[in-house]
Image (cartoon, helix red, strand yellow):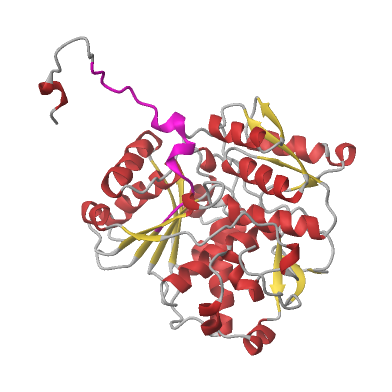
Amino acid sequence: MSDSTTLPETFVTHLESALDGTRLPGDSLQTLHRDRPLWVRYDLEAIRRSCTRDQLRDRAPGMWRYRELLPPRTSDSIVSLGEGPSPLIPCPRLGEQLGLRNLWIKDEGQLPTGSFKSRGMAMAITMAQRFGVKRVALPSAGNAGGAAAAYAARAGMECFVFMPEDTPIVNQYEAVLAGAHTFRVNGLINDCGRIVREGQERMQWFDLSTLKEPYRIEGKKTMGLELAEQCDWQLPDVILYPTGGGTGLIGMWKAFAELAALGWLDSSTRPRMISVQSDGCAPIARAFQAEERFAEPFANAETIARGLRVPAAVGDFMILDAVRESGGCALAVEEARITDWMRQAVTAEGVSVCPETGACIGALEQLIADGQIRPDERVVVFNTGAAQKYVEAITTTLPHVDLSQEIAWSDIEP
């Protein structure tokens, strides 16, 4: 924990069903209501009376600086690996290639476990420990498994991870390295989720699946709190976010609403939220186009961007609600071009973007061409993980220099 001061008594008032508004107590372990996620609700008026945004200036950096808007009660209860802040990086060359004058990438790949999952798992494990959980389990198609394993290890908690057998190899190894009981499954993430669900009674584990507990949203929403502060409380015009389970997009939209209620935003205008998927797995994009609030499961899901391969998201309606409220959209890009867009971004700016972010570059290209994003708008793309965690997506054959022969400089010159 980077800030040793004592946190105030929590401002959490209750939990609330995202589906029908049912109130549940916030001081006990909760999962879903009617099989749908829960919001954490705060006494925002009390927060407004107790602190101002100017007080943040004297606090240590990181996601826990926004303590009034987070659930933990005391600093001693926080399970931390030093997460945040992630840098907001200007990308003028990539912007010029795409036709934008003000493009930024918020690089979550620089967090402790190499992805944005650090935020959600730090909060989920912190609160699980607060409520006496000793064993957790989750399905993961990528970075969540490694992050859960790392934070569970930090908390001295037992962790079980179930992954599709074609999950990126680095994600498999990092979960094992952190001591998690890690299993490969010949199915998709939904199949892995079924194993976790069916094993709850026998194995006595707590389900950390995306949005099946209320606190990963609270960790992920710190991306929005942090972005607002980095932008001097003037939010960008557009945010592009790669969407699998969608917790980050949902969390950021919640963060902006809470900041507005506190009077911390200088403008009532909020960003248009763009939910990006691959056409190899596009349940949210398909539901948006069909003007549906709930998404049908996507059959035969396949994409190199493993974080996007979520055929059925439990928070589908929350994603779609946020996108529509913001005036944004959900769209799918061409699967075959994702690695090309990924390489374009890395080559142009040196930022280590993942395939999921490559999909966002493709979406940006499309939206600019369609006139849905203007050249003068401020645009932020979220890079949700570091490229080096996706060796399958960046594998290439390098040319060879044979030192037993005279160097052929003509083969080396570009």
Which quadrant of the view contains residue 88?
A: bottom left
Picture quarter with the N terminus: bottom right
Answer with left or right where residue 7 lies relative to residue 141: right
Q: Please name whichever residue, 270 or 127, is drawn nearer the observer in this view of the structure.
A: 127
Answer with left or right where residue 189 lies relative to residue 289: right
Please, is residue 28 above or below residue 202 in the view? below
Span of residues in magenta: 381-401
Residue in the image at 59% along x and 52% along y:
118
Residue in the image at 62% along x and 33% along y:
188
Residue 295 in view, yes or no? yes
Query: Magenta segment: does it hold 352?
Result: no
Residue 32 in view, yes or no? no
Query: Magenta segment: does it hold 399?
Result: yes
Please, is residue 328 above or below residue 369 in the view? below
Residue 48 lies, in percent from the top left, at 62, 86
Residue in the image at 39% along x and 32% along y:
394
Please, is residue 234 above or below residue 35 in the view? below
Residue 335 lies, in percent from the top left, at 40, 36
Residue 135 lies, in percent from the top left, at 81, 44
